[in-house]
Image (tube, rainbow, N blue to C red):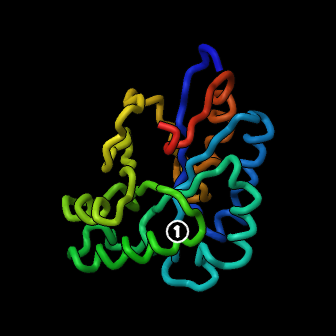
Amino acid sequence: MGNKERIIVCTDDIRPETVDKYFRYWYQLKSDHSGLKLNAFVIPYYFKEESESILNKEFVEWFTSVKDWVQLHLHGYTHSFPPECLAPKLQQEEYIEKGARLLSLLCHRDFGFKAPGYHYNDDTIEILKRYRITFLCNEKEIVWLRNKIGSDLSQPELIQSHTNGLSVDSVEKIYDKLNELFKDKEFLFLNDL
């Protein structure tokens, strides 16, 4: 790829409804930037609605169609409030275990984790390590939970957004900024690091 600046592009709140309503912006960005690789943090079972499970037929079909340029990672379990990753340890473990189990049925590889609202505690880190989650993504950096022997630990720029219409940094609201930012960049999956 030469001397292109390397970037990691992440988006949160991926679930069946947001894919239907907002993923069109990512399709257009992919059309404009053919090398785009997107790290998508999914909510496996949004507020415990069956239609919002990542294992529903439409979501599985969607992921099958984009898996060459979209990698899925875990973004909580239900995305509930109060923050599920500040819940008592046993409840946190139940959420993380269920979310990891659902995601592993969809994508059979290592994946990372981003706590909803970036709210987590020491119990969260301990549980993630136990379930062999590769990394924790927070607002500014990637925290590796497993040793990355032999890999380049210098981190490229981390670009974060949401795939919903509510957040200030939603792809819908910052589309033009992202389109400009993506010019002449080399895109990486988090698992490429």
Residue at image location 31% in from the left, 62% down from the top? 128
Out of 111 and 166, give the one closest to the viewer: 111
Q: Quadrant of the N terminus?
A: top right
Q: Residues within 10 Å of mark 1 (few under 14, many from 20)?
A: many
Residue 117 on image: x %, y %: 38, 58
Out of 78 and 6, give the one closest to the viewer: 6
Residue at image location 47% in from the left, 62% down from the top? 74
Number of marks present in the image shown: 1
Residue 80 on image: x %, y %: 41, 74
The reply, left or right, for residue 91 in relation to residue 113 is left
Residue at image location 56% in from the left, 84% down from the top? 49
Which quadrant of the figure has residue 7? Answer: top right
> Which residue ends up furthest to the top in the rendered image?
3
Q: Amino acid at mark 1?
A: Leu
Residue 183 on image: x %, y %: 68, 25
Out of 22 and 146, give the one closest to the viewer: 146
> Which residue ends up furthest to the right in the rendered image?
31
Residue 9 on image: x %, y %: 56, 40
Residue at image location 21% in from the left, 74% down from the top? 89
Identify the residue under disc 1: 103
The reply, left or right, for residue 130 in relation to residue 99 is left
Which quadrant of the figure has residue 30? Answer: top right
The reply, left or right, for residue 175 in relation to residue 156 is right
Which quadrant of the figure has residue 85? Answer: bottom left
Q: Secondary structure at mark 1?
A: helix
Give the answer, above or below, for where 167 lies relative to 108.
above
Give the answer, above or below, for where 158 lies relative to 12.
above
